[in-house]
């Protein structure tokens, strides 16, 4: 075997290992029912869909997160990584350490790619072109020349492995990475379906102010929910896997509101389209334009903003990645060693035993004053009655702040934002 063939074989084997490890973790987290039952089949379809890259961009607002967490220079943050936009954005608040956790190996590889790029890039323009615009062949050349030799073997194996189209995955950064991954393809399919039904999401970007956003929403987006095919489609749980909604979360979302899943989805899309000025909401730009806006005043996640580049670059070594479940990671941490926990919507996937195990570890590892944030598909507290009172009563739920921050979350796709605080000197 020639050296080049050996390298290709190693890359292929590494990519398969990433996918297999991801599938094993998701199986443990999601599978609750017998394989041949309807619920079991849906769970396994979700696991299959989630086994590759899902979120090239995370869909939780980091500005809201940081306001809730009140990060301090000595803090240890434990956060689910997803696309790593928020993990890196938290560096702007200057915490001492961030442990980024994810079951999905593709998300770990994306986070490590960003860290390696920060270590090798000295110009914000290069970093923004790579991870903001993400559609230049120069990105691939820069990867091959500067980043790949310094990337860990597993992450390099993932990015140099080949997708179903036969092309190296790193090539996504030459073709707009935000059109890829499960979410990117879901948004693309939504655009195709909308145009086929006479409802073009791109028209939202013509709005000059919030009043025009309302007009364009009512004209070009709202009518799609009245189409018979769309009504049928969204009644199928698998149709929303691209949004990262597992079967259990689908049930909660369907029960949230007076018009079931259709009403819930329409309300969330309306808030995304009309609740915030599109010029300042990069989530809406992604949804309606399938990428970030270009230009010096473009709305961007904090880690991509020019004003934050030097700080993010200097602090990037404080981030470590772990392919694991959050509960399992916390079991390995000393008592009273963590200050902030970012759980995204992972608890919507969990049964009562999982929630109890997680919160037992959170409570054991939390320092006084620690803060936990998470989101839920529906507007529900989620934990009372499911986590034992002797655990939950040690925490204070900040309902007023939770509702205020949920209203300001520009991603607009969740029904609830929740903040729990462990009383103590730092609270």
Image (spheres, rainbow, N blue to C red):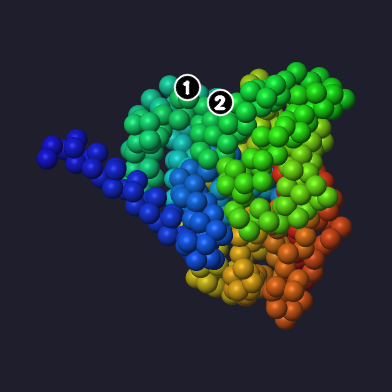
Residue 136 — which label? Answer: 1
Quadrant for residue 179, please give it. top right
Whole-percent x, y for residue 306 in the image: 63, 30
Q: Is residue 113 above or below residue 131?
A: below
Q: Secondary structure at mark 1?
A: loop
**Residue at point 50%, 66% (across, down):** 34
Q: Is residue 13 above or below residue 331?
A: above
Residue 133 — which label? Answer: 2
Whole-percent x, y for residue 425 in the image: 77, 70
**Residue at point 35%, 36% (across, down):** 162
Q: Quadrant of the C terminus?
A: bottom right
**Residue at point 71%, 57% (across, down):** 252
Residue 193 — which label? Answer: none
Q: Quadrant of the N terminus?
A: top left
Residue found at the far bottom of this picture: 390
Residue 335 in view of the camera = yes
How many labels sit on residues? 2
Q: Are marks 2 and 1 in contact (CB under 8 Å)?
A: yes
Q: Nearer the viewer, residue 13 or 369?
A: 13
> Label 1 crowding class (10 Å Cα cut-off): few <14, some 14-19, many 20+?
some
Q: Is residue 197 above or below residue 42?
A: above
The CA span between labels 2 and 1 is: 8 Å
């Amino acid at each position: 075997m020639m050296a080049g063939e050996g390298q290709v074989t190693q890359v292929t084997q590494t990519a398969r290992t990433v996918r297999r490890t991801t599938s094993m973790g998701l199986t443990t987290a999601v599978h609750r029912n017998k394989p041949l039952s309807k619920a079991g089949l849906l769970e396994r379809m979700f696991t299959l869909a989630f086994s590759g890259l899902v979120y090239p961009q995370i869909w939780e607002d980091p500005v809201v997160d940081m306001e809730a967490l009140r990060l301090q220079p000595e803090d240890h943050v434990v956060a689910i990584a997803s696309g790593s936009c928020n993990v890196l954005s938290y560096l702007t608040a200057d915490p001492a350490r961030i442990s980024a956790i994810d079951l999905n190996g593709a998300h770990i590889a994306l986070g490590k790619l960003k860290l390696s790029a920060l270590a090798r890039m000295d110009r914000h323009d290069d970093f923004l072109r790579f991870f903001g615009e993400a559609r230049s062949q120069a990105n691939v050349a820069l990867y091959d020349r500067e980043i790949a030799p310094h990337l860990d073997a597993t992450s390099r194996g993932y990015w140099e492995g080949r997708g179903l189209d036969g092309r190296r995955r790193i090539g996504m950064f030459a073709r707009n990475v935000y059109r890829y991954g499960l979410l990117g393809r879901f948004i693309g399919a939504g655009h195709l379906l909308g145009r086929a039904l006479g409802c073009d999401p791109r028209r939202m970007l013509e709005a000059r102010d919030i009043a025009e956003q309302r007009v364009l929403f009512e004209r070009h987006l709202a009518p799609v929910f009245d189409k018979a095919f769309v009504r049928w489609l969204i009644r199928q749980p698998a149709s929303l896997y691209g949004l990262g909604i597992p079967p259990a979360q689908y049930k909660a979302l369907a029960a949230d509101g007076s018009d079931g899943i259709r009403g819930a989805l329409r309300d969330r899309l309306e808030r995304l389209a009309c609740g915030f000025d599109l010029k300042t909401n990069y989530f809406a730009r992604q949804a309606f334009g399938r990428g970030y806006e270009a230009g010096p005043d473009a709305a961007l996640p904090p880690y991509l903003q020019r004003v934050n580049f030097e700080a993010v670059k200097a602090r990037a070594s404080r981030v470590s990645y772990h392919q694991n479940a959050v509960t399992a990671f916390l079991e390995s941490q000393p008592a009273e060693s963590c200050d902030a926990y970012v759980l995204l919507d992972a608890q919507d996937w969990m049964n009562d035993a999982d929630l109890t195990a997680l919160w037992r570890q959170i409570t054991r590892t939390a320092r006084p004053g620690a803060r936990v944030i998470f989101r839920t598909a529906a507007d529900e507290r989620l934990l009372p009655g499911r986590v034992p009172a002797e655990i939950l009563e040690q925490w204070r739920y900040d309902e007023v702040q939770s509702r205020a921050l949920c209203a300001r979350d520009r991603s607009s796709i969740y029904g609830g934002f929740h903040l729990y605080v462990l009383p103590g000197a730092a609270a």
